Image (cartoon, rainbow, N blue to C red):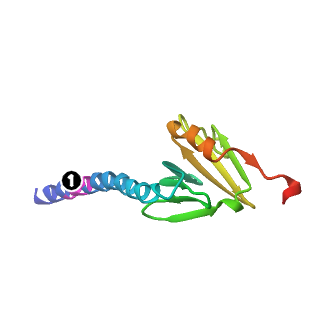
Amino acid sequence: MLTIAVLVGIAVIGFLSWTLWKRTSSDKLELFTDRRRDSSRLVSRGEFVDGSRHMPVALALTDAAFYYENSDMQASLERQWIHEVEYDDELSTGQSVGKGTVLRLRCFSQKFEFVLPAEAVRQWESFLPPHRMSAAGV
């Protein structure tokens, strides 16, 4: 009987820990967006798509770079190296993203995909319009 109570106690503690972690992880994204807000033209939340993983990230756009970060990673792409910008309703794998929109960036042979929330898409399109680098300009 005592072992069942211990197992239930461990399960409850595990569930409460997971719930607390989920709540604080969204607060951490808010810290990243607040930190970038003053120096950026545009800041929002999004999801970085890496294969089958969708990771919540804070996105920021400055005149020089595109930043994406969360508590596990901090990364950026210099805007001069972004050769193509696309907006799409599905990932390159053909998977639909529901109400969001895919922001696809290409730098040389690398492709980066981010799912933007529907309410942020119009702003992203105005600050980072879709384009392709011409073959003559390469």
Which image quarter holds the N terminus?
bottom left
Residue at figure coordinates x 54%, y 52% from the top left: 41
Q: Quadrant of residue 122?
A: top right
Q: Secondary structure at mark 1?
A: helix
The residue wearing badge 1 is 12
Q: Position of residue 114 (x, y in %)?
A: 58, 49
Of 127 and 83, the residue lying toward us: 127
Residue at figure coordinates x 65%, y 40% from the top left: 88
Q: Quadrant of residue 138?
A: bottom right
Residue at figure coordinates x 10%, y 59% from the top left: 2
Q: Position of residue 68 (x, y in %)?
A: 53, 58
What stretch of residues is rendered in magenta? 10-16
Was residue 12 drawn as part of the magenta stretch in this picture? yes
Q: Quadrant of residue 17?
A: bottom left
Of 11 and 34, the residue lying toward us: 34
Main SS class of the magenta portion in the image = helix
Q: Position of residue 20 (x, y in %)?
A: 27, 54
